[in-house]
Image (cartoon, rainbow, N blue to C red):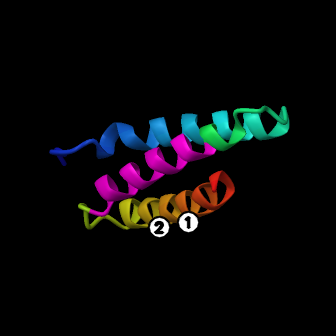
Amino acid sequence: MESHNACPNCCAQCIDACLMCIKFMVADSPFTKEACKLCADICKWCAEQCQQHEHDHCQVCAASCLTCAEACYQYAA
């Protein structure tokens, strides 16, 4: 099925952002809060893209991304 939004590639970008955030946390980087904010923004964007599709895997991805975004926003606060 053809997609008319960023859903096909947002998940890969979301994974990369989450991995970056984890690496910053493990390294106890002084930029962890900024990394978490960026990760949250990317996860929120990914959720918005995936929510537009009715596929089960897209809905599961969207829910997971929103959970991650919420946690990252809290950490970044």
Which image quarter is the C terminus in? bottom right
Residue 15 part of the magenta segment: no
Q: Amino acid at mark 2?
A: Ala
- What residue is rendered at 50% in x and 58% in y? 65
* Three-letter code for the amino acid on which mark 1 is drawn: Thr
The residue closer to the viewer here, 14 or 53, is: 14
The residue identified by callout 1 is 67
Does the magenta run of residues contain 46?
A: yes
Depth check, front residue: 50 or 40:
40
Residue numbers of the magenta segment: 36-51
In depth, the one of 15 and 30 nearer the eye is 30
Horizontal side, residue 14 vs residue 54: left or right:
right
Q: Residues within 10 Å of mark 1 (few under 14, many from 20)?
A: some
Quote the CA–CA distance across marks 1 and 2: 6 Å
Q: Is the C-beta separation of discs 1 and 2 under 8 Å?
A: yes
Residue 57 x %, y %: 41, 61
